Image (tube, grey):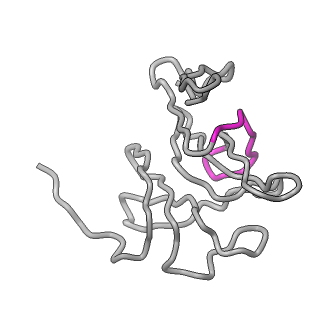
Amino acid sequence: MGSEKKLTEEKFYQIDKGDADAHSVVFSATPNFDRRIKDTFGREARNALFRYDKASQTMVPIAVDQSGGIFDFSRPKRDAKGNLYFISATDKPGGGHYLWFLVCSNRVGKQPTILTELLISMDFDIAKNTGEIFVMDKEGETLIVRKLNERAAH
């Protein structure tokens, strides 16, 4: 039977479901505990990715490369090689609401690639046995699940 240990002491706000492997857990959270965590644009990070190392019991931010204009990272998942898949935002040209995307990067947040645009509040998943990537979408007023051409490592 497992045991529970309090890790955050209310340091995080709105922790999102993580993705665990044998050594660590990656998750997203709003880091209201530390106003020094900024995005590349100098703004306080609203949602950031973190890695919790099980052996050392330490937590560190994942420094995602934001040179392509992406920010506000959530819902991380890993493939069999440890690559990260997560939802990210960009500023909408001309202002207004943000645009949302499914992004893939290497395990440390470098070389991010936008895989597809997502509607706000939509999610994705990776089939572990095949690497197929599925995203929620809409056709007209109908919610659908769409399979991407890209595959994750499995």
Name the residue nearer the viewer: 93 or 142.
142
Number of marks in the rendered image: 0
- The residue at the point 63 percent across, 22 percent down is 139
The x and y percentages for residue 8 are: 36, 72
Give the magenta range. 106-119
- The residue at the point 66 percent across, 50 percent down is 88
Name the residue nearer the viewer: 95 or 87.
95
Question: Compared with residue 23, is residue 55 higher up or lower down, i.e. above or below?
Answer: below
Residue 9 as seen in the image, left or right of residue 78: left
- The residue at the point 59 percent across, 21 percent down is 146
Q: Tell me which corner region of the image, top left, top right, bottom left or bottom right, holds residue 135.
A: top right
Name the residue nearer the viewer: 11 or 141.
141
The x and y percentages for residue 49 are: 56, 58
Name the residue nearer the viewer: 58 or 145.
145
- The residue at the point 20 percent across, 61 percent down is 4
- 110 part of magenta stretch: yes
Question: Compared with residue 127, is residue 16 higher up or lower down, i.e. above or below?
Answer: below
- 63 part of magenta stretch: no
Residue 113 as seen in the image, left or right of residue 109: right
The x and y percentages for residue 33 are: 49, 79
The x and y percentages for residue 74 are: 55, 52
Q: Residue furthest front?
A: 141
Residue 51 as seen in the image, left or right of residue 103: left
Q: Residue furthest left?
A: 1
Question: Compared with residue 96, is residue 5 higher up or lower down, i.e. above or below?
Answer: below
